[in-house]
Amino acid sequence: MMSLIKEIEFVILKNTSSVSLTGNYCYLNCKHCGRHYLNNMARVKDIEDLVKKGFTSFLISGGLLEDRKVPITTFEDTLYTLKTKYNLKYNVHTGYVDESDIHVLKKIADTVSFDLVGDQQTVKEVYGEFDYDKMWTSLELLVNNDFVVKPHITIGLNKGEFSHEQKAIEKLKKFGDRIDEIIFLVFIPTVGTEFYSYQPPKVAEVVSFLSRVRNDFSHKKLTLGCMHPKGKYREELQTELLGIVNKIVQPIGKVIEKAERENFQISYSYECCAFSSNGRVGSGARGAI
């Protein structure tokens, strides 16, 4: 029987901005995203202005090029100069990784976010021309080179249905304590994408799955990341995951209030959830949504 966690970290994204290194371009144009999320991201040229507005860290991401990589190497010098000048933190989203990328990432990345899919069929149906084995060998290369890697698993990635999720969890078990946190996202039907007409997975199914993951990884940090449906779905999901996950990103006010009523040990942090938290304990913050 699972014992509930009476601690929760609420992540309110105030100090981290997202930067696309490819503008709104992505070679793959995946069916769940359709380049939609690139449109709202800043560009490298905007970083200095964002620092002046108070941002202290950045998700360095973008679409994938034909080599299935985010072009970190192209922007290596600029990113490094800005990082050292302003003492910035970078969470880097990579795509494929080869040995040739390691020295650049060592120079740039404070942490690496890495999207994982648990089976080849889901990769084929969602991403198209993407190498399932290369995905997992890239993760292994990062872990073996001692990066702080934060795997991301999207629940319901394939048309809102469960397909790959448990397989991804099973494959992660071999990494043991070398991965200390898993970040979970939930499929969002997004306007303009091929999967827009499909519904997200049922909240009860997501909660059931994450409860099983909690049992499998009793000492690992589990995080509900920023990408999950809004509205009533978000409220219900976040409420049900209190006591199961360790962190919730972009909490709604009612969920914070519930945690306070139920005497959770609450801490707050204000940067991307992939960064190691230095959250402060106590009440007083309220959700951004």
Image: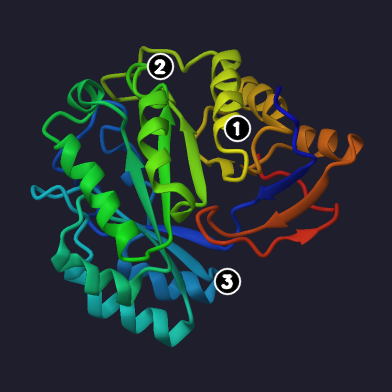
In this view, the residue in front, 228 or 218, is: 218
Circle 1: residue type = Arg
Give the left or right position of residue 34, taking residue 50 as reference.
Answer: left
Q: Residue 279 in the image: x percent, y percent?
A: 70, 61
User: In terms of secondary structure, where does tag 1 sit?
Assistant: helix
Give the left or right position of residue 108, taking residue 262 as reference.
Answer: left
Dot in front, 3 or 2: 2
Dot in front, 3 or 1: 1
Circle 3: residue type = Gly
CB contact under 8 Å: marks 1 and 2: no
Q: Which residue is mark 1?
A: 214
User: In terms of secondary structure, where does tag 2 sit?
Assistant: loop
Q: Earlier in the sequence, mark 3 or mark 1?
A: 3
Q: Quadrant of the C terminus?
A: top right
Give the label on residue 162, or none: 2
The residues bearing labels 3 and 2 have C-alpha atoms spaced at a distance of 39 Å
Residue shown at the point (60%, 58%) measured from the top left: 14
Give the left or right position of residue 138, taking residue 217 as reference.
Answer: left
In this view, the residue in front, 265 or 235, is: 265
Using the rendered image of the protein, determine whether residue 190 is visible from the camera's viewpoint: no
Residue shown at the point (70%, 26%) measured from the top left: 2
Graded by Cα atoms within 10 Å as few (under 14), some (14 to 19) or many (20 or more), the crowding at tag 2 reads some
CB contact under 8 Å: marks 3 and 1: no
Give the label on residue 56, or none: none
Circle 2: residue type = Phe
In this view, the residue in front, 33 or 221, is: 221
CB contact under 8 Å: marks 3 and 2: no
Q: Residue 9 in the image: x percent, y percent?
A: 70, 49
Using the rendered image of the protein, determine whether residue 101 is visible from the camera's viewpoint: yes
Q: Which residue is mark 3?
A: 54
The outermost residue toward the bottom is 85
